């Protein structure tokens, strides 16, 4: 813009040159502003580079032409205004005023000669160079604009990534927290306190079971996986403690494959299922019920079944039960997904009219 | 104090019984393992005090209270359930955490004992089966709960199949009909002003004559009650000596 100002200042008086230039700068700003609106509306910043480049070039050429036309109109307009206010302006432009000692007719022929300089081909060259320079201006404008947009976008994506990983961490933490139910711990302690008087031997056993359970739940977050055998020991501790509260209402048995015991599984998964079975089924049945934990191994995977007396639809009708169940189960599902992807699964369904079965399938490597 | 223990765990009930043995003013009249059993025993034994476990299979402690017509004094017991207790906004209530500390238990029991003694002293017209201003009701509205003394209630108002209870700054709804409440409430204190409303006479601020011989009553809480013409006659009768 400075160069074009200097160029114009060469053959225009200072003030009109300055005005013309200011106008053309304003026009350029206006055109690029409209262009920005259009780009925003069409979401060009989300385009890939190969899609973007031809569009930007095309748009820059179009803008260049528009701006050139507008600038020329302004320029011509300025000349006309100047010519009207001072008829000698054209002469002075051509340097005729400096040619003294010439008669009018000679001057006239000089004027004609000067105007004849503007031949078609010369005008064409002028137009092309003018449009090109404007186009280059708009290309650089676009380059700066999109570079800024891309940096901004990259930064936003970075922030999104952080947020995502933070929320995954959060979910993992809340999974750990959800594992041991404080209500259960304090109820157990209260029951044990009562047992001390009624059956001190059983009270002593129960303290051991509670200790094992607490130790496991405090320690297990150091391990990503534990052996099924270890997990089932903890499940048994838990069932022992629940049995003090539920007494004869809770019956349970383990049917475990000898080979399955060594297989590694994520800790607290079976425990969560058993806890759910008690909380949502056995607890609500006046006569209590049974829990059967069994395994099956095939070539690809280990399946652990937790079957219990009760029906899913009954549970859902009890206020709030469904919601709580949902959290425990979906936490377990999420952990399985993080560890094994699509290869692991957790399904809870009615087995028949008396029993519900929860099945965890874990791939063998 | 006739006392009933409600907890689904037999061991927990036994433990509490053992702890309560040392209190001479507590007489354990029974125990219940579920809300339904408790409801029966409360209606049958009419205890002065219940120890109530909040978390029970089936109906929980709050659901039991909602079903009760005459509320005994309540001491809640819970293993770990603080958020459930936060539901209470209006009255400070007594609760114990399990395992129960003997000292805390002693504090709660003596507080309830004093309250019952005071109530008995004030209640000179005992024997009637009506709800008096000394009785309390349990009100639950969504997540919030209150124990409300009837003396604090200004107004009962029909809203659909429910009744809105006005007290303090709250107006929750209860599931009883206005007609039922009218039959249960002491008519020395509670007056049926019209088809929609029962007012507490102790809360009247001023009374103005209204159209064609009826009355308009202004309550201290700011409510304005139009007394129907039929009830105006009754009201004047009630107020004249």
Image: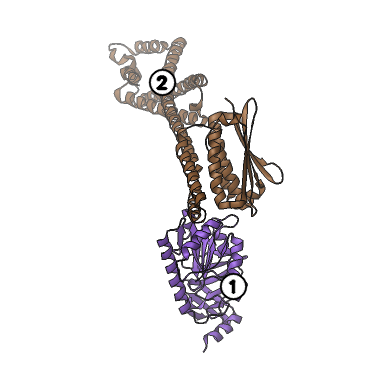
Chain colours: A brown, B purple
Give the x, y percent position of residue A299.
Answer: 64, 25
Can the viewer see residue B159? Answer: no
Residues A358 and A170: in front is A358
Q: Which residue is mark 2?
A: A140
Instruction: Identify the element where label 1 is drawn.
Output: helix
Q: Which quarter shows the C terminus of chain A?
A: top right
Instruction: Identify the element where label 2 is drawn.
Output: helix
Give the x, y percent position of residue B111.
Answer: 42, 68
Give the x, y percent position of residue B8.
Answer: 56, 57
| Residue at point 47%, 36% (across, down) | A220
- Please, is residue A144 above or below residue A265 in the view? above
Looking at the image, the residue that sits furthest to the front is A201
Looking at the image, the residue that sits furthest to the right is A353
- Please, is residue A332 above or below residue A7 in the view? below
Q: Which residue is mark 1?
A: B181
Q: Quick check: A149 left or right of A325?
A: left
Give the number of the mark in front: 1 or 2.
1
Indicate the chain on which mark 2 is placed: A
Q: Which quarter shows the N terminus of chain A?
A: top left
Residues A262 and B49: in front is A262
Q: Categorize mark 1 by other alpha carbons within 10 Å: few (<14), some (14-19), many (20+).
A: some
Residues A274 and A63: in front is A274
Query: Disc 1, disc 2: CB below 8 Å?
Result: no
- Please, is residue A302 above or below residue B74 in the view? above
Give the x, y percent position of residue A140.
Answer: 41, 20
Give the alpha-carbon distance from disc 1 to disc 2, as whole Å: 82 Å
| Residue at point 52%, 85% (across, down) | B239
Count of numbered badges drawn on the protein: 2
Q: Quadrant of residue B10?
A: bottom right
Q: Quick check: A121 left or right of A111?
A: right
Can the viewer see residue B116? Answer: yes
* Residue B60 badge: none
């Amino acid at each position: 813009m400075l160069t074009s100002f200097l160029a114009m200042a060469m053959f225009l008086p200072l003030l009109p040159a300055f005005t013309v230039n200011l106008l053309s700068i304003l026009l350029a700003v206006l055109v690029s502003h409209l262009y920005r609106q259009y780009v925003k509306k069409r979401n060009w910043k989300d385009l890939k580079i190969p899609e973007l480049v031809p569009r930007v070039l095309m748009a820059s050429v179009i803008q260049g032409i528009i701006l050139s036309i507008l600038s020329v109109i302004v320029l011509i307009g300025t000349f006309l205004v100047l010519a009207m206010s001072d008829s000698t302006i054209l002469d002075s432009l051509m340097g005729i005023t400096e040619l003294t000692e010439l008669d009018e007719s000679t001057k006239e022929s000089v004027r004609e000669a000067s105007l004849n300089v503007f031949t078609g081909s010369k005008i064409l060259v002028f137009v092309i160079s003018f449009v090109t320079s404007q186009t280059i201006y708009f290309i650089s404008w676009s380059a700066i604009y999109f570079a800024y947009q891309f940096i901004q976008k990259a930064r936003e994506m970075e922030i999104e990534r952080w947020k995502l990983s933070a929320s995954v961490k959060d979910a993992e933490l809340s999974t750990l927290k959800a594992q041991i139910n404080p209500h259960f711990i304090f109820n157990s302690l209260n029951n044990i306190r009562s047992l001390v008087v009624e059956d001190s031997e059983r009270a002593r056993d129960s303290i051991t079971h509670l200790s094992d359970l607490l130790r496991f739940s405090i320690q297990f977050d150091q391990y990503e996986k534990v052996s099924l055998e270890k997990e089932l020991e903890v499940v048994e501790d838990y069932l022992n403690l629940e049995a003090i509260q539920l007494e004869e209402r809770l019956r349970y048995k383990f049917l475990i494959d000898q080979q399955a015991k060594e297989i590694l599984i994520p800790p607290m998964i079976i425990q969560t299922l058993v806890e759910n079975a008690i909380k949502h089924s056995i607890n609500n049945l006046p006569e209590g019920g049974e829990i059967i934990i069994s395994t099956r191994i095939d070539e690809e995977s280990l399946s652990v079944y937790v079957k219990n007396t009760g029906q899913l639809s009954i549970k859902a009708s009890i206020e709030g039960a469904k919601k709580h169940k949902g959290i425990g189960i979906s936490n377990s599902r999420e952990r399985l997904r993080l560890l094994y992807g699509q290869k692991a699964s957790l399904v809870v369904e009615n087995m028949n009219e008396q029993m519900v079965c929860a099945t965890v399938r874990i791939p063998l490597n | 104090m006739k006392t009933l223990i409600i907890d689904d765990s037999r061991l927990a009930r036994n433990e509490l019984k053992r702890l309560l043995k040392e209190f001479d003013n507590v007489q354990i009249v029974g125990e219940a393992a579920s809300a339904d059993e408790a409801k029966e025993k409360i209606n049958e034994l009419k205890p002065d005090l219940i120890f109530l476990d909040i978390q029970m299979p089936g109906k929980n402690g709050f659901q039991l209270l909602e079903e009760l017509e005459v509320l005994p004094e309540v001491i809640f017991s819970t293993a770990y359930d603080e958020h459930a207790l936060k539901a209470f906004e209006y009255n400070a209530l007594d609760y114990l955490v399990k395992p129960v500390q003997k000292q805390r238990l002693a504090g709660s029991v003596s507080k309830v004992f004093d309250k019952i003694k005071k109530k008995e002293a004030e209640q000179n017209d005992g024997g009637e089966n009506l709800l008096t201003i000394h009785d309390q009701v349990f009100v639950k509205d969504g997540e919030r709960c209150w124990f409300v003394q009837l003396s604090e209630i200004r107004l009962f108002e029909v809203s659909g199949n429910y009744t809105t209870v006005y007290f303090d700054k709250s107006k929750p709804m209860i599931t009883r009909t206005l007609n039922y409440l009218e039959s249960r409430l002491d008519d020395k204190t509670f007056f049926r002003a019209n088809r929609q409303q029962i007012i507490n006479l102790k809360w009247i601020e001023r009374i103005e004559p209204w159209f064609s011989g009826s009355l308009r009553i202004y309550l201290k809480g700011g409510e304005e009650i139009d007394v129907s013409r039929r009830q105006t006659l009754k009201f004047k009768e009630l107020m004249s000596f």
